């Protein structure tokens, strides 16, 4: 398998670099995440609910790896310093973007979604 990934350099031009697979750091390779809300007493005392909960029925797909459990990331060993810097800037923008989407989602659907 050809393991490369395309990243943008400082000029915004796409460059193909060697890549490697890593376990998704967000879900720990699970591919899903727990719902992320606090369970009510009514829920925790409902054995049927708890069974479903522990079986992962209420989990949502991990938004980082989208259920794939692993991520193809640029292999930093092969990258130039300026390319690393460009990636850092891009990652920062992506984090801000993700936080924005998350807060919008909470606003629309409430914290229990
Ligand atoms: Zn994940």
Image (cartoon, helix red, strand yellow):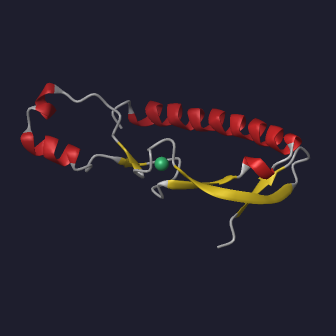
Residue appearing at x 63%, y 35% in the figure:
95
Q: Specify the quadrant of the image occupied by residue 67.
A: bottom left
How many numbered marks does the figure carry?
0
Q: Is residue 113 above or below residue 62?
A: above
Q: Specify the quadrant of the image occupied by residue 81.
A: top right
Where residue 66 appears, as percent x and y from the top left, is 49, 54
Give the residue furthest to the bottom: 1
Residue appearing at x 47%, y 37% in the figure:
105
Q: Is 5 on the left or on the right of 31, as rendered?
A: right
Look at the image and tell me in which quarter the N terminus lies.
Answer: bottom right
Q: Is 11 on the left or on the right of 87, as rendered?
A: right
Look at the image and tell me in which quarter the C terminus lies.
Answer: top left
Q: Is 107 on the left or on the right of 71, as rendered?
A: left
Residue appearing at x 34%, y 41% in the figure:
34
Where residue 55 appears, as percent x and y from the top left, is 22, 50
Where residue 44 appears, as percent x and y from the top left, is 14, 32
Q: Specify the quadrant of the image occupied by residue 89.
A: top right
The front one of 17 and 93 is 17
Give the residue furthest to the front: 77
Residue appearing at x 21%, y 44% in the figure:
54
Give the residue furthest to the right: 11
Where residue 47 appears, as percent x and y from the top left, is 8, 41
């Amino acid at each position: 398998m050809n393991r490369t990934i395309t990243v943008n350099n400082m000029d915004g031009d796409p460059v193909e670099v060697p890549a490697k697979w890593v376990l998704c750091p967000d879900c720990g390779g699970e591919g899903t995440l727990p719902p992320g809300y606090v369970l009510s007493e009514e829920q925790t005392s409902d054995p049927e609910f708890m069974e479903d909960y522990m079986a992962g029925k209420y989990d949502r797909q991990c938004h980082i790896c989208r259920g794939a459990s692993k991520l193809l990331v640029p292999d930093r060993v092969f990258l130039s310093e300026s390319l690393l810097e460009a990636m850092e800037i891009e990652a920062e923008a992506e984090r801000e973007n993700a936080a924005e989407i998350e807060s919008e989602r909470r606003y629309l659907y409430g914290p229990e979604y």
